Amino acid sequence: MDQLRRTFLKSAGIAGSVVVAIGAGLLKSGEALAAAWNSNAFTAKSIADAMSAAGFAGATESKDIVIKAPEIAENGAVVPVEVTSSIPGTTSMAMFVEKNPTPMVGSFEFMAGAEPYVSTRIKMGQTSLVRVAVKAGGKTYMASKEVKVTIGGCGG
């Protein structure tokens, strides 16, 4: 059997399997998955509006949320942030940057038993508070940390 025929049959088999999975409802199109995102929270212009739209309004301060981020970020385009929640029953977490044009930068959901830990890189336009809000046990909690963004990467 020549190589071209094998490649064609293999590709046709994979494509057929994907079509069957979509038809059975096992796979959803990207549009269907994207429709579930909270557009009001991600497009809000103030941190209060973003937190309210995301369901984190009235969050109380908690020391059980640990934010690891640099004190000074020389490049605001890629600021590494790690967040861990020690609050039992954490089901979701959201990150906000207070002075960004659109403050909400990320939203994360955790299945039962998953460790509530997120490591990502965010974009910051200027020195600001990075706020992390957590839902656990029907309540909302929050922690914040200031990150200074330098202009031009001069380190001061």
Image (tube, rainbow, N blue to C red):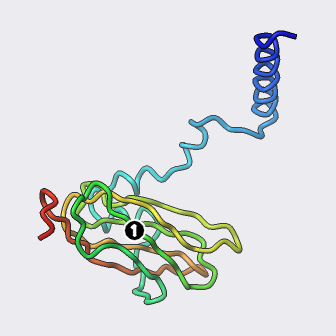
The C terminus - image quarter: bottom left
Where, quadrant-wise, is the N terminus in this rendering? top right
Q: Quadrant of residue 148?
A: bottom left
Residue at coordinates 21% horizontally, 63% vertically from top-left? 74
Q: Is residue 22 above or below residue 78?
A: above
Compared across the picture, whether 55 is left or right of 31 comes to left
Residue at figure coordinates x 48%, y 53% from the top left: 38
Quarter location, residue 25: top right
Instruction: Count how many numbered circles sit on residues in the image.
Output: 1
Q: Residue furthest bottom?
A: 63
Q: Is residue 66 above or below residue 94?
A: below
Amino acid type, callout 1: Val
Determine the residue positioned at 40% across, 57% down.
41
Q: Secondary structure at mark 1?
A: strand
Residue 101 point in image, percent of width and height: 24, 55
Q: Position of residue 113 (x, y in %)?
A: 70, 74
Task: Give x and y (percent) for residue 48.
Answer: 31, 68
Percent of width and height locating residue 152 = 13, 56
Q: Residue furthest right?
A: 1
Q: Residue furthest front?
A: 2
In terms of image quadrants, where is residue 132?
bottom left
Above or below for 102 versus 128? above
* 132 vs 103: above or below: below
Q: 7 left or right of 72?
A: right
Going 35% across and 73% down the picture, which residue do you hit?
69
* Residue highlighted by disc 1: 81
Image position of 19 (left or right of 68)? right
